[in-house]
Image (cartoon, rainbow, N blue to C red):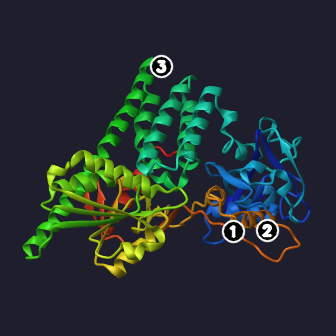
């Protein structure tokens, strides 16, 4: 028998495909290197430098031809490690679940699955009936991998229902920013915990951590850093309560108190960020006035729908000795968040500044393609952040990077990133920049609903791309977020003050130390 040190280490993804209440399993062929003829999910090794999620998408398409047209990401499971001496391997497993789209969603159902050489057959199974047994003929630890994405098998009905409802709310909310979504996630987690009526013991604590993992990873993972850090802040207090020798009722009261304190703290973050921005602009304008330059207007460009940025603009304008505010907003399509942001700013301005105030607002919505025109004469480009990596790269709404390039080229504007520090990733977690592509349907539907006749031709081409007797391929990319390089931001406007890249790097290492010190969600 091989010793542990001699085992070949492999990092692999296990991709479970769900449709309604069933999961697909695939009978491995005799041509594969390990576990021939066993039932398994889609699986494969990570390429060098490849993220687990990217590997999951790649393996799914290679082994079944399924792509973003046919499936969407459903859940991500907690990775784990096990050894199998029979094949001389130590496996690190990254479990994923994907959901097969129906025809009404633009998919093709199970008919879209075409197997490659790695599999003989496939079929649908009841996830509750999948076992780790020779009789079932599954690959080793099949049930363990499945249960990491199909949590329904390990939770009571109330807990499972609450967790699924929370995930659905996070997945379908395309209006709220990262801060708001994290607050929603904390409230959802509070509801999940309230449904866990079992004895508060080690198994209860394991289930609680699993729920936290899914809310941060299986909801909107592109915005999940803030949620993960918020949960990690909760974990030490929760674990301490778990191990206290108290009655069940007292423990419940203390759990709810932990959540309520976290929510109160979150409510104060936007106000502190507004204060930071106001102080930054007051110093900037003081320097301008001291240099002898005249300044009676403030010109701001943004493409954010953030209420924090909206309120920061208007509150800071009120505190400055200037009369004119020029706000330019880049429209983002297909969700058209720009007009909502503009409408919100206009309503707030009318409330705060009546005509007798002597204050004047010029509000312009530009198409995102005209960003160079919108950048002329701008003082500040204001961006939000959904994640910030340790090197200072910023993940934000798509269109942010072109806006940065435009203002750097066309004007001398400063680029300011508004963000809570909970969005900073620990080193090693934010470097692999996956992109959240939400599929073509939103874009296609906006064309079709606008009466664009050519959309029908393109939609038909999308449906036919997989056919073997055609010599073309068409795609519609609907990416929500993109990464901005670390040289772009001039300053980070945070609840603890104005920060630079060195401050962000220091915070990232503090997050890493906190993750090691606090109870992990694994």
Left or right: 481, with 24 as reference point: left
User: Residue 465 bears which disc, if any?
Assistant: 2
Q: Residues within 10 Å of mark 1 (few under 14, many from 20)?
A: few
Q: Identify whether 83 is placed above or below 183.
A: below
Closer to us: 453 or 493:
453
Distance between the alpha carbons at the discs numbered 2 and 1: 9 Å
**Number of disc labels:** 3
| Mark 2 / mark 1, whichever is N-terminal | 2
Q: Residues within 10 Å of mark 2 (few under 14, many from 20)?
A: some
SS for tag 2?
loop
Closer to us: 361 or 318:
361
Circle 3 is placed at which residue position?
248
**Residue 444 appears at what percent x and percent y?**
66, 60
Q: Are marks 2 and 1 in contact (CB under 8 Å)?
A: yes
Distance between the alpha carbons at the discs numbered 3 and 2: 58 Å
At 37% across and 28% down in the image, what residue appears? 257
At 81% across and 60% down in the image, what residue appears? 64
Left or right: 8, with 218 as reference point: right
Closer to us: 465 or 219:
465
Q: Residues within 10 Å of mark 3 (few under 14, many from 20)?
A: few
**Residue 246 appears at what percent x and percent y?**
43, 20
| Mark 3 / mark 2, whichever is N-terminal | 3
Circle 1 is placed at which residue position?
475
At 35% across and 74% down in the image, what residue appears? 375
Distance between the alpha carbons at the discs numbered 3 and 1: 55 Å
Closer mark to the observer between disc 3 and disc 1: 1
């Amino acid at each position: 028998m091989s010793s542990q040190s001699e085992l070949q280490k492999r990092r692999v993804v296990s991709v479970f495909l769900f449709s309604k209440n069933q999961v697909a399993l695939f009978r491995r062929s005799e041509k594969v290197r390990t576990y021939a003829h066993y039932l398994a999910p889609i699986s494969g090794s990570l390429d060098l430098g490849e993220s687990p999620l990217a590997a999951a998408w790649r393996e799914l398409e290679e082994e079944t031809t399924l792509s973003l047209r046919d499936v969407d990401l459903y859940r991500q499971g907690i990775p784990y490690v096990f050894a199998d001496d029979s094949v001389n391997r130590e496996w690190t497993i990254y479990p994923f679940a994907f959901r097969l789209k129906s025809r009404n969603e633009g998919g093709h159902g199970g008919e879209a699955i075409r197997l490659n050489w790695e599999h003989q057959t496939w079929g649908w199974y009841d996830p509750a009936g999948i076992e780790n047994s020779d009789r079932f003929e599954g690959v080793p630890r099949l049930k363990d991998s499945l249960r990491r994405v199909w949590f329904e098998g390990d939770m009571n009905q109330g807990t499972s229902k609450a967790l699924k409802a929370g995930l659905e709310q996070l997945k379908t909310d395309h209006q709220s920013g990262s801060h708001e979504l994290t607050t929603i996630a904390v409230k959802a987690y509070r509801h999940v915990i309230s449904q866990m009526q079992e004895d508060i013991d080690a198994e209860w604590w394991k289930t609680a951590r699993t729920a936290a993992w899914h809310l941060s990873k299986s909801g909107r993972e592109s915005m999940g850093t803030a949620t993960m850090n918020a949960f990690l802040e909760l974990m030490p207090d929760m674990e301490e309560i778990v191990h206290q020798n108290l009655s069940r009722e007292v423990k419940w009261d203390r759990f709810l108190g932990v959540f309520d304190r976290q929510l109160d703290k979150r409510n104060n973050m936007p106000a502190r960020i507004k204060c930071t921005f106001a102080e930054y602009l007051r110093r900037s304008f003081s320097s301008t006035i001291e240099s002898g330059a005249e300044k009676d207007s403030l010109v701001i460009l943004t493409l954010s729908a953030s209420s924090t940025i909206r309120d920061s603009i208007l509150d800071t304008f009120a505190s400055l000795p200037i009369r004119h505010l020029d706000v330019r907003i880049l429209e983002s399509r297909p969700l058209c968040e720009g007009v909502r942001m503009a409408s919100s700013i206009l309503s707030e301005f009318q409330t705060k500044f009546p005509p007798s105030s002597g204050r004047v607002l010029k509000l312009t919505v530009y198409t995102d393609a005209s960003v160079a025109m919108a950048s002329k004469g701008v003082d500040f480009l204001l961006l939000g952040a959904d994640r910030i990596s340790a090197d200072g790269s910023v993940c934000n709404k798509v269109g942010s990077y072109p806006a940065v390039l435009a203002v750097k080229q066309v004007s001398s504007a400063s680029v300011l990133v508004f963000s809570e520090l909970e969005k900073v990733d620990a080193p090693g977690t934010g470097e692999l920049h996956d992109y959240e592509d939400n599929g073509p349907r939103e874009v296609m539907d906006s064309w079709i609903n606008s009466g664009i006749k050519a959309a029908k031709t393109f939609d038909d081409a999308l449906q036919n791309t997989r056919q073997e007797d055609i010599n073309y391929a068409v795609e519609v990319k609907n990416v929500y977020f993109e990464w901005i390089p670390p040289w772009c931001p001039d300053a980070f406007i945070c609840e603890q003050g104005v920060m630079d890249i060195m401050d962000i790097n220091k915070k990232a290492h503090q997050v890493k130390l906190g993750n090691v010190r606090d109870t992990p969600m694994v």
